Structures are given as structure tokens and as C-alpha cells.
Amino acid sequence: MIALLARTGEGGARGLTLFIVDKPRFSGHDFEARQPGGGTLAGKADRTPGYRGMHSFTLAFDRWLVPDAQVVGGEEGIGRGFALQMAGFAAGRLQTGGRACGLCQAALEHTARYVAERRQFGRPIGEYGLTRYHLGRMAARLAAARAITYAAAAAMDGGERAAAPVAAMAKLFACDAAVEVTQLGQLLHGGWGYAEEYPISRCVVDAQVLPIFEGVKPILALKVIGRSLLARGR
Ligand SMILES: Cc1cc2nc3c(=O)[nH]c(=O)nc-3n(C[C@H](O)[C@H](O)[C@H](O)COP(=O)(O)OP(=O)(O)OC[C@H]3O[C@@H](n4cnc5c(N)ncnc54)[C@H](O)[C@@H]3O)c2cc1C
């Protein structure tokens, strides 16, 4: 099924409605479904350099009938889709922070293993001070990302609205950490870090998308975190 936010009226954010749209199951990277009345729903996976385990699809709806019962919130939900969508963002940002921590952890583990095995100038590169310096910075970024993500999870117990600013901070910080930590890990792999044969190369491309989805990072800082700080001071 698809959670679909669609424009159903005038008035900016107030003219949006949230629907749950059924679609047949399919496997593969594109599909076209047909309804008895002639409606079609077609989808095609967008090719991406990373995050290939979870594709995004471009969808085309043509006279695709969605029953009234599938308007989220029923009659009262019409025109309230934006508010309903926003209410779910703290949870999405929290779990994106969690995914970022997972990538940092994976990058650290792959890198620690590699530097113990790779020898240059007669020694494993893990014995060089510069390698340990980078590993130390990677581990510290991971620890900080994890701490703020757990703080957001704890705040979520007090309700999604209260947790929104800290969930946004966790997402912002942990996703930046994932980009930095995976790239440092790649650097420590040298040329092999760019080869698909080594998992660190996948960590790097998977991390790239994290500061973009669930709220692109400058907008999170500006509109969610910055705005809530100034609102508190008023
Ligand atoms: C792999 C992937 C999966 C996704 N999955 C989902 C999903 O499941 N569900 C879903 O709803 N969405 C999904 N998205 C969409 C994603 O949430 C958006 O792409 C993201 O929030 C950014 O929005 P946008 O692409 O419209 O960028 P834009 O809003 O067009 O932003 C482009 C640039 O302009 C800047 N900008 C925008 N507004 C301003 C402003 N007012 N002032 C200054 N600068 C501004 C931004 O900072 C950014 O740098 C997914 C995206 C990707 C890449």
C-alpha cells in the first residue's frame, strides 16, 4: 500500500489530504496496475548510487479510484493531510538517526578490521599514529550520534510533539556523523575503499542520502530546530 499526500483543494498546506492507496504486490523495478474501470497506476524505481535495498519510485496515477474509506481521518481528514504527515515526522527522524548510527558502527568495524590486516612499510597500518587518530575521531562521532539518538528516543516516550526538536537534532547530527565517519573509513581503506568488493564503499554511498531525506539538513536546522529555539525564548 502507499501513503499518499495529494492536493485536494486550494490554500497551501491546508489543501492537502492523506490517503492510503492499495496496490497489487509486485517484484522488480517497475509495475503497472489496472483497475476494472480503466484506471492505471504505474511505478518505476529511480536509479540511485546507493540505498539500493530500499528503492524510491516515481508513480503515475491515471483515474485510479481510491474509496472514501481510505481517506486518513475520514471526512474530517480532508484538507488536514499536511498536519497528519507532520505529526509522523519525529518518529521518522528518530529512526533515521538510528540508521545513521548503524552506518557509523558498520564503518568503524569494517575499518578497524581492515587496518589490522593491511600492511604498508612492514607494519599493519593500524600501528601508525595517524590511523589511530582517525579511528578515535570516528568512534567519538559514533558515540555522540548514538547518545543524541537515544536522547530523542527517550523524549519520544513523552509524546511525538515534545520530541520533535530533539528528534530533528538527532537526525541532523547523526546523519552528518555518518557521512564523515564513512568517508574517513573509506580513506583508511586507501584504493580498496573505492572498490565495491569492500563493504566500506557501500557505507559511503548509503550515507550520502541520510542528510537529504526525512527533511533536508539546512531546512531541519532552520525551520525545525532554529524556529523552536526562538519560539521558546518568546
Ligand atoms: C532515497 C529517498 C527516499 C525518499 N523517501 C521518501 C518517502 O518515503 N516519503 C516521502 O514523502 N519522501 C521521501 N523522499 C523525499 C525527501 O524527503 C525529500 O527529497 C527531501 O525532504 C528534500 O525535499 P526536496 O527533494 O523537495 O528538496 P527541495 O525542498 O527542493 O530542496 C532542494 C534544496 O533547496 C533548499 N531549500 C528548499 N527550501 C528552501 C528555503 N525555503 N530556503 C532556502 N533553501 C531552501 C534545500 O535546503 C535543498 O538544499 C525520499 C528521498 C530520497 C532521496
Image (cartoon, rainbow, N blue to C red):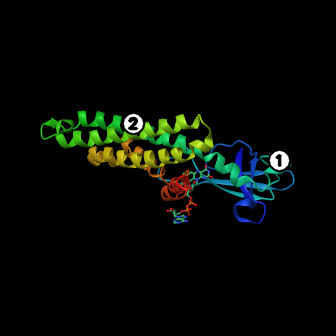
How far across and down, in percent of the image, does residue 26 sit? 68, 43
- Residue 107 quadrant: top left
- Residue 157 quadrant: top right
Mark 2 lies on a secondary structure that is helix
Q: Between residue 234 and residue 211, name the one nearer to us.
A: 234
Q: Between residue 137 and residue 164, name the one nearer to us.
A: 164
Callout 2 amino acid: Gln
Q: Residue at x 50, y 56 (%)?
A: 226
Residue 19 seen in this snapshot:
yes
Q: Counting other residues with Cα less than 10 Å from the Cα at mark 2, is it few (<14), some (14-19), or many (20 or more)?
A: many
Disc number lying in front (2 or 1): 1
Q: Which mark is residue 202?
A: none
Q: Is residue 30 above or below residue 127?
A: below
Q: In what quadrant does ligand 1 lie?
A: bottom right
Q: Between residue 199 and residue 160, name the one nearer to us.
A: 160
How far across and down, in percent of the image, does residue 64 sit? 80, 55
Q: Which mark is residue 74?
A: 1
Quarter of the N terminus within the rendering: top right
- Identify the mark nearer the N-term, 2 or 1: 1
Q: Residue at x 57, y 48 (%)?
A: 55
| Furthest residue in direction bottom, as rendered | 10
Q: Residue at x 80, y 49 (%)?
A: 71
Q: Real-space Cα distance between discs 2 and 1?
A: 43 Å
How far across and down, in percent of the image, does residue 44 sit? 63, 54
Q: Counting other residues with Cα less than 10 Å from the Cα at mark 1, is it few (<14), some (14-19), or many (20 or more)?
A: few
Q: Which mark is residue 105?
A: 2
Ligand 1 lies under 8 Å from the Cβ of mark 2:
no
| Furthest residue in direction left, as rendered | 122
Residue 35 seen in this snapshot:
no
Callout 1 amino acid: Gly
